[in-house]
Amino acid sequence: MGILRQLSFWKRGNSKLVPFDERSESRVPEVKADLKSAFSSCDTRLEVQRFRTSTPASSPSESTCSGASESPADAEVEPSASGESAAFSPFDLVDFNASQQEISRAVAHEFGEEVASSLQSTKWDKRLRSLQSISSMLAGRDLEGGKTTKSRTEDFWEVPAWRASCLVLHQVLRDKVIPVNLAALELFRDTFEDLDEAEPEVRHAVGVLIDQVTSRLGDSNVRLHEAARRDVVFAARLLGLPDLLRRLRSRLEEAKGNERNKVHFGVLDTVSALLRAESGWAVEDITGFITLGLEETSGPRIRKAAISLAETVYRLRGAESAEVLFANLRSAKRNLLRQRFEEVDEEQRSEEGGEERPDLDDFLCAAPIRALASASASAALPGAVPQGEEESLMDGILEETGLVFQGAGIANERRGRKSVSFCQFPDDVVEVEHAVDEDLLEHEASSLGLTDLEDEEAILREILMDSEEESDFD
């Protein structure tokens, strides 16, 4: 999960920490006076987990711990063979008044010289890559392969790296380049993810940085507005919803001039998202936002956002919230909200299956069934024979081929066609040109009661002779 897993105020207890050897435990050296201005008094609540090892990007002489006072105890802590350098000790709160030089030293010490120099570059793509590198290292990911790299996380002493990330955020959240600002908003979530909201240092850092995040609410770039809104909803767990609502209300009231419309829209939209994500709020805390949004000087976009916020409150808290929302509104605005609430009620009834009518419980409507049957009948394939007309169609086919049903059997009416012939052999064997005609003749003979083969041959000869005489006569 990254280096933040091993913070002393980390929530989860399954972080893989290497126990500090009691035999090698010693006092961590104090930093010089130039770094004391960057951080406050020593934190007695946080314990040093382990020392940060040197990396190719940074050396002990270039880090923020360079020039620290040496003592016999320091010599025991700092082994020369492994090249390990003593990390500076943790402090109570992050000092956001640190100078640019002090911030660069802290970033170089924790994330490397290349990242520190890229943050100061005039090219925005370098600043973007440096922020992505910090996010990747905080999460313990390999930026190229996207996999967790344990060796990278072990090189950091977690609390100073987290503080250095907060100092970076304090700078880059003011960046005017959209891709850089989007990366900074993402770094905000990576920095404070899964931290203990009860820790004073966390609340202090979030309280300072959240004001810069809310400045992006309502931005003309939709992606910036949505990213800032996600960060504000994310910070509600760390700051607490009442504190966050007070900050947003203050920003709503302080907006003036050309910034007023976009600030009002951004704040109202964010408050609506907060209500859907959190449950610890009262209707009285939201009425002020709606009242400001429905002022006569507000534009149509702001009024629409205020009405949408009122609908959200009504959906979540029910009809009893309507009277609280109407308290400070004029009659025209009350009627507008009342009409919208009625539409919400109708929508909810339609979703639940309509209005309950006990008087119609015994009433059965078969119209949908008939409509379904007619619909299925009309959906026949092209060229299909309608129901009830199969028999007529078969009769027509038989008539066209000269075959009709007549009482006891089937008679062949097409006698003008010579279908039987005799071979000039002593036995006078009858040959039939077509198997179908032969079958018909045999069926005709059997229908006359002729079972003997000789009788059948005699009848066949008579039929043939009659057909020949008719042809000669013609």
Image: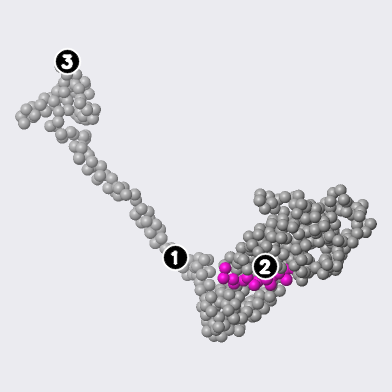
Question: Badge 3: few (under 14), some or many (20 or more) residues near its Cα, within 10 Å?
Answer: few
Residue ID for mark 3: 425
Res 243 → quadrant? bottom right
Asked if residue 102 can be seen in this view, the reply is yes
Q: Nearer the viewer, mark 1 or mark 2?
A: 2
Name the residue at 43% across, 63% down: 364
**Amino acid at circle 3:** Phe
N-terminal of the two: label 1 or label 2? Answer: 2
Q: Magenta residues?
A: 205-221
Crowdedness near tag 2: few (<14), some (14–19) or many (≥20) residues, C-alpha within 10 Å: many
Q: Residue at x 62, y 66 (%)?
A: 177
Q: Position of residue 198 (x, y in %)?
A: 77, 67
Q: Helix, strand or loop at disc 3? A: loop
Quadrant where the image shows the C terminus:
top left
Give the Cα separation between the discs numbered 1 and 2: 65 Å
Mark 2 residue element: loop
Marks 3 and 1, Cα distance to the nearest angstrom? 86 Å
What is the residue that sits farthest to the left in this orientation? 473
Residue at image mark 2: 173
Q: Percent from the top left, x then y, of residue 6? A: 78, 57
Q: x and y percent of residue 110 in the render? A: 77, 58
Nearer to us in this view, 51 or 71? 71
Tell me how far mark 2 sits from mark 3, CA to CA.
Answer: 115 Å
Disc 1 designates what residue?
363
Q: Position of residue 244 (x, y in %)?
A: 69, 73
The type of residue carrying mark 2 is: Leu
Image depth: mark 2 or mark 3 in front: 2
